[in-house]
Image: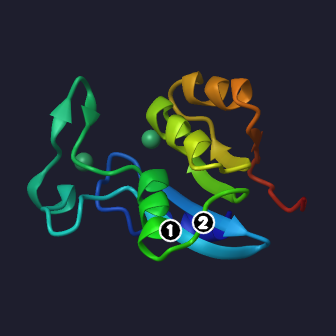
């Protein structure tokens, strides 16, 4: 989780800094933070791209982590995902389809629709409070 928070600090959209880390057998295989697609302008430089009250320019941290895993040829099946904020509905769908087994997050974000979907799909999830010292 500390790694996820460190990664979040690289976010290029200051509306919310989110970080994600995918681990397999305790090793980090991919990380992601919310930011613009490769080569596209950053919110920090050109302002947000607002639609319906949300900034839509960025790729979410979870999505970037999944893309990074794919790019580097790591299977996400049976992995664990650590995120600073609970996943949105879209990210939850991707998490489930990617075969991620465990999801740990620190802050419950906006809506519970994503988490409800994880529950329905039998993905284990846990909200880690500010004290995340307990180990699995
Ligand atoms: Zn933005
Ligand atoms: Zn998302």
Label ID, residue 69: 1
The residue located at (67%, 57%) in the rendering is: 77
Q: Is residue 50 above or below residue 100?
A: above
Give 117 or 73, whichever is nearer the viewer.
73
Give 75 or 100, whichever is nearer the viewer.
75
- Provide the secondary structure element on which disc 2 rests: loop
User: Residue 132's quadrant in the figure?
Assistant: bottom right
Label ID, residue 135: none
Residue 5 shows in this picture: yes
Does mark 2's beta carbon lie closer than 8 Å to ligand 2? no
* 10 Å crowding of disc 1: few (<14), some (14-19), many (20+): some
Camera-side mark, 1 or 2: 2
- Provide the secondary structure element on which disc 1 rests: helix
Residue 68 locus on image (x, y percent): 44, 68
The residue located at (72%, 69%) in the rendering is: 24
Give 26 or 105, whichever is nearer the viewer.
26
Determine whether label 1 and label 2 are within 8 Å by CB: yes
């Amino acid at each position: 989780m500390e790694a996820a928070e460190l990664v979040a600090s690289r976010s290029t959209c200051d509306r919310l800094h989110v970080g994600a880390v995918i681990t397999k057998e305790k090793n980090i295989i991919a990380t992601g933070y919310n930011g613009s697609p490769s080569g596209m302008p950053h919110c920090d430089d050109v302002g947000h791209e607002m639609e319906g009250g949300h900034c839509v320019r960025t790729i979410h941290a979870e999505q970037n982590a999944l893309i990074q895993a794919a790019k580097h040829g790591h299977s996400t099946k049976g992995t664990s995902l650590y995120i600073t904020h609970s996943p949105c509905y879209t990210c939850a769908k991707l998490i489930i389809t990617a075969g991620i087994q465990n999801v740990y997050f620190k802050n419950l974000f906006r809506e519970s629709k994503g988490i409800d979907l994880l529950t329905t799909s039998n993905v284990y999830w846990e909200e880690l409070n500010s004290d995340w010292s307990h180990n699995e």
